[in-house]
Amino acid sequence: MFMKSFDLKKLSRPVVLSLVISSAALSAVWEEPAFATEAAVSAATVNYERDWIVTPKAAYELIQQGALVLDARDVDLKKKQGVLANAVPVTWQDLSEPDLPTKGRLIGDANELTKKLQALGISKNQPIVVVADPINGWGEDGRVAWSLRSVGHTQVVIADGGLAAIQKVGALAIQPAKIPGDFVVAGASKYEIKKEEIKDHLPKKDLALLDVREPREYAGKTPYGESRGGHVPGAQGLWYKDLIGKDGKLLPRAQIEKVLAAKGVTKDKEVVPYCTGGIRSGWTTLVLTDLGYKARNYTGSMWEWSAQPAAEYPLQKN
């Protein structure tokens, strides 16, 4: 509309250039931000460095091509919904420290964790599809996939919509795991953050802390055995399931990014999700990483943080 009020033929060249540049600048200001690319739609298009979440069709094709399938549903859901033939049953607890307050953290002994993973049939060059139930579960597929990515396996994905979405594509022919596997756990993970580092960053306010628990937990309730209630100072509350639709699939990616932006989570910041024991936040970290954010999961989460001295590891209830 602005440009239509002028006859460009009657204007001098410098004026025309000025108007064009000004119009371009205004367009840049008003332009919608560039959003993350959509999930890989087929096995052939999967880029493991970028794609941590793939479409059900891509996951189905990976499985048909021989990917290892880890069934991360909890024990009760496996019993209720039925065993998945030839899939390897695993729970997040299998890969985590056994006792509070560090129950959410990955097993710290690399040799012990390596043995556990090899016993599951995990090999370094075999792709892995982790499945679970996003509607009735707690993000277990994301947590297990995040765990494997964190210790150095580079070909691990989950399916958008979980197991049910993959099964709608077609009948699965899962190949049995070859046990033992040959995967060896790598060193320190760039996808995990420790409590000491979060504590040191609190005065700087340079981390985008994301509390992905239920609103009641963020407000101070302690339904899962936390020593103290509340949230880490400066953390924004975002119930992780608010990023999932009724069908169990992620909301449109552009919509997710707008939700995150409203919480102050942008791609120029390092994002630290946490929950009770790093399960829901593991799923969230996987989603954020897939979308192109710099994210690290605080696996100790509230079980660990709330068990520390309140003066050093404070919590807020407002």
Image (cartoon, helix red, strand yellow):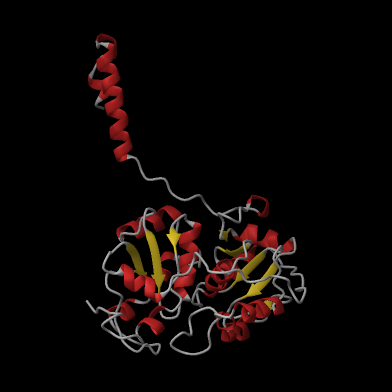
The relative height of residue 303 versus residue 27 in the rendered view (above or below) is: below
Q: Residue at x 58, y 55 (%)?
A: 49
Q: Is residue 63 left or right of residue 148?
A: right
Q: Position of residue 122 (x, y in %)?
A: 69, 72
Residue situated in front as seen by the camera: 206 or 258? 206
User: Where is residue 85 shown, x and y percent of the image?
Assistant: 73, 77
Is residue 209 positioned above or below 75 on the image? above
Picture mark count: 0
- Quarter the C terminus occupies: bottom left
| For residue 165, above or below residue 120 | above
Can residue 89 be seen here? The reply is no
Which quadrant: the N terminus? top left
Q: Is residue 157 visible?
A: yes
Report whether 8 appears left or right of 77: left
Examine the image and state in which quarter residue 56 appears. Answer: bottom right
Residue found at x 27% / y 64%: 204
Task: Tell me if 24 is positioned left or right of 83 in this view.
Answer: left
Residue 67 percent coordinates (x, y): 71, 65
In percent of width and height, residue 70 lies at: 65, 73
The quarter holding residue 172 reads bottom right
Q: Is residue 246 left or right of residue 129?
A: left
Residue drawn at x 73%, y 62% is 64
